[in-house]
Each structure stands twice: as C-alpha cells, then as structure tokens.
C-alpha cells in the first residue's frame, strides 16, 4: 500500500510540475512573440511586408538590411540614442543623489512626520504629465532651456525623485537602526556609519532606483514632445515616432528596428540584475 | 578598564513623564553591573545614554573619570552588544569582527592578529568566512561579543543579549557570558528584565522602575533585604508575600513559611502565620501552596522532599522566623526598620 501511495504522490508531483512548465512556456512565448515579430519585420522588404497573403512570421522574399540603413542614414537615430543615453544618465545621477539622502532623512530623522511626508511626496508622482507640462513649459522657457535636451534633465527628476524616494524609504525602513548605531559605537560618525552600513545593505534598492529612473526616462513621451522640437535634441521615443511617421506613411520596419536596437541591450542588462531587482521590489514588503 | 558613572541623569521624551528620572549610579572597576527592571522602566534608555546613542536631557555621564556627556559614541571607547546582535549582514564574520579595527585605522596585519585572538576567545575560529545569516542564534551572539572584545574597550554595554536564545541555550550562554567577563575583566553594564539572569550573573544589581533606581546592591542584598515593596515583589518567583498588619505591610518570602514545629529548631523568634490553603501546585522539585493570610493572598513554597500537609480548604498554623520578616510602610511602600 505504502508503495502505491508514494508512487501516486510522485505522479501527482510530476503532473503539477508539468502544468507549471506548460504555463511558464505559454507566458514566455506570449511575452516573446511581439519581439520575435518585430525582429523579423526589421529585415523584411516592403513588398513582403505589405502583401496580405504572406505569412508575417516568414521571409517570403530575401531579408534586407535596407531598413536599418534608412534608420541610420536618413534619420538622426544615432543622435537620438546619444541624447537618450545622456538624458538618462544625468537623470539617474540626479535621482540617486537626491533620493538617497531624502529617503534616509524621512525614515530616520523626521520622526512620525516622515511617513506622511513620504506619502505626500509619492502623491506628487500621481499628477499626470499631461497636466503638468503646461506650467512646466513656462518654467523651462524661463530658464532658457526651450528646445534643449537639458530641459528633460531638468524636468524628469520631478517624477523620478518622488517615486524613487518612496521606494527607497521602504528599503531603509527594513534596515534595523541597531546596525547603524552599532557602526557608530564601533567608531564611525553618523555619515560614516551610513556610508558603510546603510548604503551597502541597500544596494538592491539603489539599483532598483537606477533601473526605474532609467526606464522612465527611456519611455517618457509627453515632456519630450512638448519641450524639444529640433531633431538634434530629440530622444528616441519622440525622435523615431516623429521622423518615421510622415503623414500617413509609416516606416514600419525602421520603427521596429529603432525599438529593437535599444530594447535588446537593455533587456540583457536588466537580466543581469534581475534577482536584485526583484529583491528591491519585495524587500520593503516582506519582513525578515 | 574604567569606572562608569552617571550624575543626575535625566531623559525626557516629549511632554510625558521622564523615561529616566535623575539616576546617580557608579560602577566599580571591572564590575558586572546589571540594570534590572520591567519593560519600559528606562533601563535601555539609561544604557543608550551611557553609550552616547541618546543625548540626556540633563545630567552627566562619566567614563574613567572623564565627562563624556557631549561626546559621540565613537569617542567613548565602549563596545555595545544589542539585543538583535546587529551584525553587519553584508560582511563575513571576519569582517564584522574587524570592523571596529578598520574604523580605528589599525594596520591590516594587526587587524588579522586581533580578529584571530578574539575569535579564539569565543571559539568561533571556524566561522570566520560565513555570513551572519548562516549562523545560529548562539553563534551570532558570540560573533557580536568578539566584535565587542576586539578593540579592547573600557566598557561593555550589553542590552538583553540573551533574549533571542531559547531557554536551554540561555542557561549555557549565561555561564559563557559571565566566564568571558571574568576572563577579560572589563567593566560591564548589562540590561535585562529577567531576574534569573540578573541574580545569576550580576556582581551588583540596580533595580529600576519608572526611571528611578529603587535599589542598588548585590543579588543577596536585593533579594534578602529589599528596599521597598516594588523590589520585594519584582524579584522572586513567586514574589514576596505582603500582608497588611497594624498599618504596615508585612513581607515574607514563600520559602520562609513553614509549619511551626519545623522552624522551632532553627533558633530565633517565631511569628505565627495562620495560613488558609486554597490551591496547590505540584511543580516537581517543589510545591506551591496558594492561600490567604489575614485576608490577603499569600503563597508558600515547600520542597517536594519535605512532607507538609496542605489541603485546600483547611487552615494551618504556619510560622516565619522573625529575622525573615520585613516591614514596609503601607503608604509609601518603603522599608521600615525594626522588628515585626
């Protein structure tokens, strides 16, 4: 009897694993399909793409590099990429430099007001940019950054800082005070203790902030469209959509190429930090 | 080695009553001094003020005869072990222990020597490459002690370091901790709410309640000669019996009650106690008999080896030696001199 019982449990367990793998495979394909389609489209000739009877996932005509050539030579795509990286790097830097001390002081030094202040700061993030760009455009014009990529460096931290401050607060809250006080007893000043304990322990949180600020900058559209009109200052999100959609003509393959070329390195980069990234989002919630 | 002294130390949080309400305390050199009291009595706040983690509202802290009230923790040459052990989770055990040395900019070779020395004293040489999360509670405690020991501080401050251990482990940890303190001979201030820890380890105990020291003395003095009813009832389990008589409270320990004839040979005057038994608890090594004396609740404790009849519902003629009776003022709770 015991033998059959064990066998039954074994079968059940194998069945459960099978279901989990089937589901995982389904969702992996579901998530990957658009990318696969995009990559195939990048190399398609116009006639192949626009013939309705053709299978969209196969090359019915020989693949071509012409679309990438169009993207690179006939638009300022490389300038857009450069602008995006510059703006993103600056925004990430500003965000980290501002949020680490902000979140620390709100969790450790502001007493019982800290929590409500933190929520208040977070609420600012919920005001939609479609409303905010009107007053902000006035400010951008007043400081003379109209039509400059530095306008985005000025404006993007207004939404990255509130969210990231709130994110880091959850992180700092999970670090026991004892550890910092121990470092102060062990011979460091408060700043020294923060630098040697709080910062290293919250590396996953800071990485989360970096990734989040970077991703927000990358896909931000409204401000970029409102504040920059010359090709030289555009980021990818605005640049490719304004220059590869001319009237009602969509340069589909070049549009796909523009998206895929930035998406793949970022996907690989995120993968490197995936574990820490997940830790960053769950650490505040789960104790221990 | 150093003497720790506090002078009129006060800590007030917000508007309410003071957490620490004017404490004057001086340790002896190399002493194991226990701060004992119920939770919220101010003992941890007092320890944190000695450590420099909490600025006092008034008063002074002196370490080794030097006023350190306004010095940051790092300038006080102290080591502290927190209840949580506060190990640095991102560092190996070796780096945890070396951390205070790094702060003091001790040369690398010297650091390694000191870490090996401290790890040897605590018997954790085999754990140096591990991370704190890979250690058991007892191992963490030893790492925390090694880190406290490594810079050879003037004073150890320990905040309930045994409360995270299970009961079995705690008994052996008490033994280890006291042995360790005797070996290194460093003045130690130890906070606990556990009277067994206090009685078992302390050279002297300061019993604290509501921010004030109620009594300071050796475990024997605190137990046998309590200064007031708080100390009398906080120590001992079950606590001292208090019977109102002639405007005073008459105090006697449960183990001092016995049938008259058993005490007659002990030498000394007997004070009769009419004990009405209501309930009995058999605890293996001893029996607790609950009852009433002159209308007040009382407990008697008999070793299981002695056969004392004590049936619930019946009255017995028990007695207490006069020298074991303490008198307290009914209004203030303070000890009153003189015989019962």
Image (tube, helix red, strand yellow):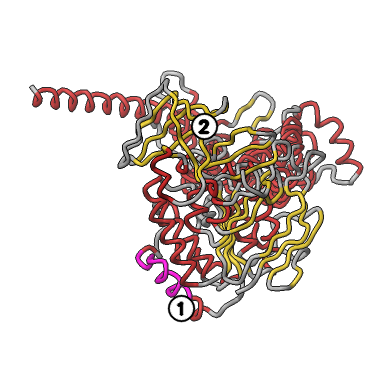
Q: Quadrant of residue A155?
A: top right
Instruction: Identify which residue, A109 or A134, lies in the foreground.
Output: A109
Looking at marks 1 and 2 on the same chain, the residue that comes earlier in the sequence is marked by: 1
Residue for point 77% across, 53% down: B22
Instruction: Identify which residue, A118 or B237, lies in the foreground.
Output: B237
Residue for point 80% across, 59% down: B59
Q: Which residue is mark 2?
A: B298
Instruction: Identify which residue, A65 or A197, lies in the foreground.
Output: A197
* Chain letter behind tag 1: B
Q: Quadrant of residue A13?
A: top left
Q: Which residue is mark 1?
A: B113
| Relative to B72, residue B198 above or below | above
Q: Is residue A203 visible?
A: no
Residue for point 76% across, 63% down: B69
Do the residues bearing badges 1 and 2 touch, measured as CB atoms within 8 Å?
A: no
Q: Position of residue B134 (x, y in %)?
A: 39, 53
Dominant secondary-structure state across the stretch colored magenta: helix
**Local secondary structure at mark 1:** helix
| Relative to A219, residue A203 above or below | below
Q: Nearer the viewer, mark 1 or mark 2?
A: 2
Q: Is residue B68 left or right of residue B338?
A: right
Residue B116 painted magenta: yes
Quarter of the image with the C terminus of chain B is: top right
Quarter of the image with the N terminus of chain B is: bottom right
* Chain letter behind tag 2: B
Q: Is residue A11 left or right of residue A229?
A: left
Q: Position of residue A226 (x, y in %)?
A: 79, 34
Residue for point 62% across, 50% down: B207
State which region is magenta: B114-126
What's the CA distance linking mark 1 and mark 2? 58 Å
Residue A247 painted magenta: no
């Amino acid at each position: 009897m015991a033998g059959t019982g064990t066998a039954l449990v074994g079968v059940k367990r194998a069945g459960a694993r099978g279901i989990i793998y089937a589901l995982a495979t389904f969702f992996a394909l579901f998530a990957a399909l658009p990318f696969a389609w995009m990559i195939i489209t990048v190399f398609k000739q116009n006639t192949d793409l626009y013939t309705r009877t053709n299978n969209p996932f196969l090359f019915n005509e020989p693949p071509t590099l012409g679309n990438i050539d169009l993207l690179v030579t006939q638009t300022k795509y490389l300038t857009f990429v450069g602008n995006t990286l510059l703006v993103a790097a600056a925004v990430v830097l500003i965000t980290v430099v501002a949020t680490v001390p902000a979140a620390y002081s709100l969790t450790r030094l502001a007493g019982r007001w800290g929590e409500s202040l933190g929520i208040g700061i977070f609420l600012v993030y919920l005001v939609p940019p479609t409303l905010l760009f009107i007053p902000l455009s006035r400010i951008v014009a007043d400081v003379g950054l109209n039509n400059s990529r530095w306008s985005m460096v000025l404006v993007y931290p207004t939404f990255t800082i509130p969210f990231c401050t709130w994110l880091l607060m959850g992180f700092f809250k999970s670090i026991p005070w004892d550890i910092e006080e121990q470092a102060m007893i062990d011979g460091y000043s408060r700043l020294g203790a923060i630098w040697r304990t709080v910062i290293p322990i919250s590396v996953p949180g800071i990485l989360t902030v970096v990734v989040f600020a970077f991703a927000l900058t990358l896909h931000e559209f409204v401000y970029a469209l409102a504040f920059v009109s010359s090709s030289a200052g555009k980021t990818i999100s605005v640049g490719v959509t304004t220059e590869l959609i001319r009237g009602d003509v969509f340069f589909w393959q070049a549009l796909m190429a523009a998206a895929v070329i930035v998406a793949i390195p970022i996907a690989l980069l995120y993968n490197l930090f995936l574990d820490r990234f997940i830790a960053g989002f769950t650490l505040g919630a789960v104790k221990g | 080695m150093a003497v720790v002294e506090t002078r009129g130390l006060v800590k007030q949080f917000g508007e309410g009553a003071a957490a620490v309400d004017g404490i004057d305390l001086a340790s002896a050199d190399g002493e194991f001094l226990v701060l004992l009291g119920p939770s919220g009595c101010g003992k941890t706040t007092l320890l944190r003020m000695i450590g420099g983690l909490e600025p006092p509202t008034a008063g002074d802290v002196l370490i080794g005869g030097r006023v350190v009230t306004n010095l940051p923790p790092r300038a006080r040459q102290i080591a502290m072990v927190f209840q949580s052990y506060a190990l640095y989770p991102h560092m190996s055990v070796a780096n945890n222990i070396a951390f205070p040395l790094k702060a003091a900019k001790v040369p690398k070779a010297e650091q390694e020597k000191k870490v090996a020395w401290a790890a040897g004293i605590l018997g954790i040489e085999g754990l140096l490459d591990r991370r704190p999360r890979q250690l058991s509670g007892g191992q963490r405690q030893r790492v925390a002690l090694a880190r406290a020991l490594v810079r050879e501080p003037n004073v150890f401050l320990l905040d309930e370091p045994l409360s995270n251990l299970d009961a079995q482990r705690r008994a052996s940890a008490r033994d280890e901790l006291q042995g360790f303190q005797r070996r290194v001979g460093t003045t130690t201030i130890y906070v606990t709410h556990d009277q067994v820890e206090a009685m078992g380890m302390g050279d002297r105990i300061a019993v604290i309640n509501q921010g004030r020291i109620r009594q300071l003395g050796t475990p024997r003095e605190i137990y046998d000669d309590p200064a007031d009813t708080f100390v009398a009832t906080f120590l001992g389990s079950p606590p001292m019996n208090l019977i109102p008589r002639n405007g005073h409270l008459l105090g006697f320990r449960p183990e001092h009650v016995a049938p008259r004839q058993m005490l007659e040979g002990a030498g000394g005057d007997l004070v009769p106690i009419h004990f009405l038994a209501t309930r009995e608890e058999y605890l293996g090594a001893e029996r607790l008999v609950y009852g009433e004396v002159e209308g007040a609740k009382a407990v008697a404790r008999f070793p299981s080896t002695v056969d004392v009849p004590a049936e619930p519902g019946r009255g017995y003629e028990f007695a207490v030696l006069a020298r074991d009776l303490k008198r307290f003022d009914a209004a203030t709770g303070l000890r009153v001199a003189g015989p019962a």
